[in-house]
Amino acid sequence: MTETDFTAEWLDTRYSFDSKARNQQVEAAFKNYFFGRKEIQLMDVGAGTGNNLRYWFRQLESPQKWTNVELNPELLALGFQQAAQLLTTEGYGVKQFENHISGMKRKNGRFHEVRLLALQESFLDFAFEILPVKPDVVLANAVFDLLSPEMFVAFAEKLIEHRIPLLSTINIAGLEWSTATFQDKYYSRCYLHHMNRPQAFGMALGAHVTNFAIDFYKKHQVNVEWGRSDWQIAETDTAMLLANLNYMEQAIPEMLPEAEHSAFSEWLSDKRKQVEAQKLRLNVYHYDWFVYF
Ligand SMILES: C[S@@+](CC[C@H](N)C(=O)[O-])C[C@H]1O[C@@H](n2cnc3c(N)ncnc32)[C@H](O)[C@@H]1O
């Protein structure tokens, strides 16, 4: 199965970087497409703690019915509680049931509802046929790079078959340290290769995800609006820089021969010192795409 071992702390740390990075032109295409709808049904796949709902619910004028599909039960449960809190803080009257929430608020003289249904399952196995109403759009933030090409194709074909638009954001494409030394570039490549390492389900797309997806959509002659959504992590964003280094500490040694481990440890320790001294920046390159009919 795909990777589900993410912490709520990491998803929370990256939220503000994702929010700043999201591509404005892609977002405009998405918002225009749904402008003026009486209601919009959104399905967030690999929803984690619900960062997509957190990002979008104030921005969409129409009443919203969200279905969050997530395999990791802790992330799903935490996201459920956080959504109830968020809606309450925003002045919604909130009713909470076993796996769904309804929030109601008067807006411009009308009732505005935000609903959330939380489903613990793999979105790859999701059968759209069982739904009485299919989603108006599927959203996926930082998810598709975890899939193998075969998994991506099977899911994307399902969406095309049902003519369901897709907003896929923060798909990784590369990274670059401000110091740009030979070692920085070498370890960055190792980190990206780690995403494509053989796993039980095959090899994940990692940083190739956007090229692969755009080729796929061109072949299927569907409309795609796409563009960059890079994280620009500044010298002062020390928690985010350290979180990225912590991921690298786990991943990169798996890609190196034993003889190179001590050189990598030294590099890592230098990087942490540069973060402490606020002398290091990191750009992580991503793409967003909106696929529509
Ligand atoms: C990098 S996290 C992103 C979470 C969330 N979209 C966000 O932006 O914060 C990827 C998420 O996809 C979930 N995931 C991975 N494979 C999945 C699958 N087959 N079905 C459902 N969720 C999956 C993981 O558990 C994790 O929560």
Image: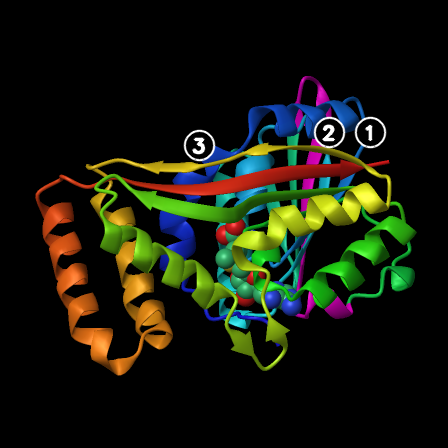
- The residue range painted magenta reads 106-125
Q: Amino acid at mark 1?
A: Lys
The residue closer to the viewer here, 13 or 106, is: 13
What's the distance in space between the residues labelled 3 and 2, CA to CA? 23 Å
Residue type at mark 2?
A: Ser
Tell me the kind of residue under disc 3: Lys
Dot 3 surroundings within 10 Å: few (below 14), some, or many (20 or more)?
few
Horizontal side of 229 relative to 277 (left or right) equals right
The image shows residue 2 at horizontal and vertical percentages of 59, 71
Residue corresponding to mark 2 = 62
Residue nearest the observer in this picture, 136 or 179: 179
> Residue 68 in magenta?
no
* Comparing labels 3 and 2, the label whose residue is closer to the camera: 3
Which numbered disc flags the more N-terminal residue, 3 or 1?
Answer: 3
Residue 159's tag is none
Characterize the local packing of mark 2: few (<14), some (14-19) or many (20 or more) Cα atoms within 10 angstroms: some
Between the residue at mark 1 and the residue at mark 2, the CA separation in whole angstroms equals: 6 Å
Q: Which mark is residue 38?
A: 1
The answer to whether residue 42 is left or right of residue 186 is: right
Q: Earlier in the sequence, mark 1 or mark 2?
A: 1
